[in-house]
Image: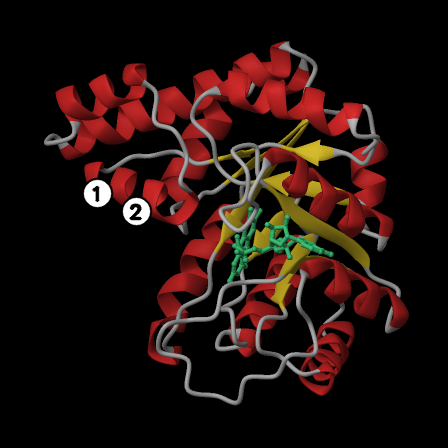
Amino acid sequence: MKIRELLRQEQTSLSFEVFPPKKDTDFANVETATLGIAKLQPSYMSVTYGAGGSTKGNTIQLASEIQQKYNVPAISHLTCVCASKENIKAALNEMKSAGIENILALRGDLPNNFEGEVFTDFAHASELVTFIKENGDFCVGGACYPEVHPDSPTKADDLEGLKRKVEAGCEYLTTQMFFDNNIFFNFMYRVREAGITVPIIPGIMPITRRAQVKNAVKLSGCNVPERFKNIVDRFGDNEAAMKQAGIAYATDQIIDLLANGVKHIHVYSMNKPEIAAGIQANLSEILKA
Ligand code: FAD
């Protein structure tokens, strides 16, 4: 099923994300976790892609298994930084053969230890979107940043980049994580005012360990509100308490988004079936309402 069709439905949707292992020896553990999440029957699942193509085979295999074993529509991420058109074409062909219909098109960031050849065929995700559309019948999504992508000098530049991506054929956008819903609501106002009309799916990251906070901020530059800092200060040293509090905080964010007109929620479930299940259970009646 193409994600664009799912996004047209009235039904509220909850989707989960997993990431493939860097080393093939870790594949079995990630596969178990991935299928544990697929078993929950989310609306769809997405599988990330190592920039530089390092996880290509594992990304495609996990996405394919999600669809085949649990009949859950899957999105394969695809990055274009340092990739050649031939590399991308080969990846698209593999995806087609594996029955994958949905791609999240990303620029990616050049890995520090990247040892392969660096091609410059694609400068931005928008160019990848165009290329994918020219080379297959995929439903293509992209990323957006409520707190502005670090490469964008201004909010206006960021919106300009986003507009180009949508004009290139990007059919929906998933946001970078955020911990303050007001940031998302303000972003939505700016996006719609700029004339971008595609569906925007908020990406919610449940923080269930103290160490994750530092990584999340480093990765995304997102603002951590005082209310959440207090939760981490109070419960961060107690594994079980922090997990419960992190699931509760993410649930609270999601309920507020749904109460304010959002229909589709994507959860960065980080290969943790128990976290995905915890959030889904907290929302069992809400998702039906
Ligand atoms: P782009 O859309 O190319 O944007 C990057 C910068 O360039 C922005 O500042 C933008 O405003 C600007 N820009 C865009 N188009 C133009 C243009 N035509 N002209 C001038 N400027 C332009 N990384 C991975 O490696 N693997 C993943 O699987 C992955 N999944 C992700 C999923 C989501 C939902 C998100 C939010 C991020 C994900 N990332 C992933 C991280 C992402 O690759 C990085 O944030 C990267 O720095 C930017 O990728 P992008 O696709 O947003 O880039």
Q: Is residue 100 visible?
A: no
Q: Looking at the rendering, in which quadrant would you find the C terminus?
A: top right
- Image point 66% across, 68% down: which residue? 123
Q: Considering only vertical position in the picture, is 195 above or below 138? A: above
- Image point 77% across, 34% down: which residue? 199
- Image point 55% across, 20% down: which residue? 284
The quarter of the picture where residue 194 lies is top right
Q: Residues within 10 Å of mark 1 (few under 14, many from 20)?
A: few
Q: Can you tell which mark lies on residue 282?
A: none
The reply to whether the C-beta atoms of the residues labelled 1 and 2 are less than 8 Å apart is yes
Left or right: 108 as drawn, with respect to 224: right
Count of marks placed on residues: 2
Amino acid type of disc 1?
Ala
Identify the residue under disc 1. 211
Image x and y of residue 273, in percent: 41, 44
Q: Can you tell which mark lies on residue 215?
A: 2
Left or right: 198 as drawn, with respect to 201: right
Image x and y of residue 131, in percent: 81, 70
Task: Point out the residue furthest to the left here.
Answer: 237
253 vs 62, nearest the viewer: 253
Left or right: 150 as drawn, with respect to 27: right
- Image point 28% across, 25% down: which residue? 244
Cβ of mark 1 under 8 A from ligand 1? no
Image x and y of residue 171, in percent: 81, 46
Label 1, label 2: how many angstroms apart (C-alpha)?
7 Å
Task: Point out the residue furthest to the front here.
Answer: 153
Q: Considering only vertical position in the picture, is 58 above or below 140? A: below
